[in-house]
Each structure stands twice: as C-alpha cells, then as structure tokens.
Image: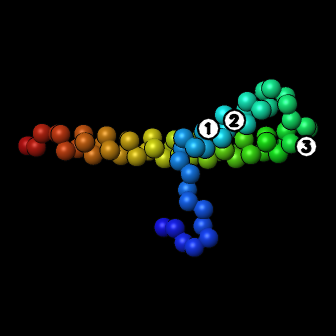
Amino acid sequence: MSGAGQVPERSFEELRAELEEIVGKLERGDVAVDEAILLWQRGEELHRLCAARLEAAEGRIEELAASTDDTDAPTL
C-alpha cells in the first residue's frame, strides 16, 4: 500500500548494492571521519534491512515447502 508522499519500498538488490557501495568507500578510506561515521551508520541500517528481507524470504520458502509436502503426501 503506497500513499501520497511515501517512498516506494526498495528491493533487496537495491539495498545490497547501496551497502556494497558504502563498504567500498569505507575500504578505500577516501572519506572524512565524520562522513565515515555516517556511512557506517547507514551501512548498519542497510544490513539490518537486508537480513530482515532474507529471513522473511527464508520463512516464506519454508512455508511453501511445507505446503508442497502436505499436498504431495499420499492420502489413506
């Protein structure tokens, strides 16, 4: 559900790409200390979002696998 003024939800791939960009900047060391701290904080937020998406996907796959197992079981 998307209302006026709301930002559309970004995909896992978009979040991961942003996180990889931040990691690259931090690894190169080409940012000032204050910016590095802000990037680190954003990276932590992105990591949490990505982890939550992966956990949700895993749960959904487990649900689908269980429902498939239930429908494939022979009936007596």
**Mark 1–mark 2 CB contact (< 8 Å):** yes
Residue 12 higher or lower than 30, as above or below: below
Q: Which residue is mark 2?
A: 21
- Residue lying furthest top in this view? 28
CB within 8 Å, label 3 to label 1: no
* Residue 43: % across, % down: 72, 41
Q: Is residue 6 left or right of residue 67?
A: right
Q: Which residue is mark 3?
A: 34
Picture residue at 78% right of the left edge, 45% below the top: 41
Furthest residue toward front = 30
Q: Judge left or right: residue 41 versus residue 21.
A: right
- Amino acid at circle 1: Ala
Q: Give the amino acid type for the residue marked by disc 3 in the picture.
A: Asp
Please tell me which residue is depicted at 74% across the width and 46% down the height of the picture.
Answer: 42
Q: Residues within 10 Å of mark 2 (few under 14, many from 20)?
A: some
Q: Residue at x 78, y 27 (%)?
A: 27
Q: Which residue is mark 1?
A: 17
Looking at the image, residue 76 sits to the left or right of residue 56; the answer is left
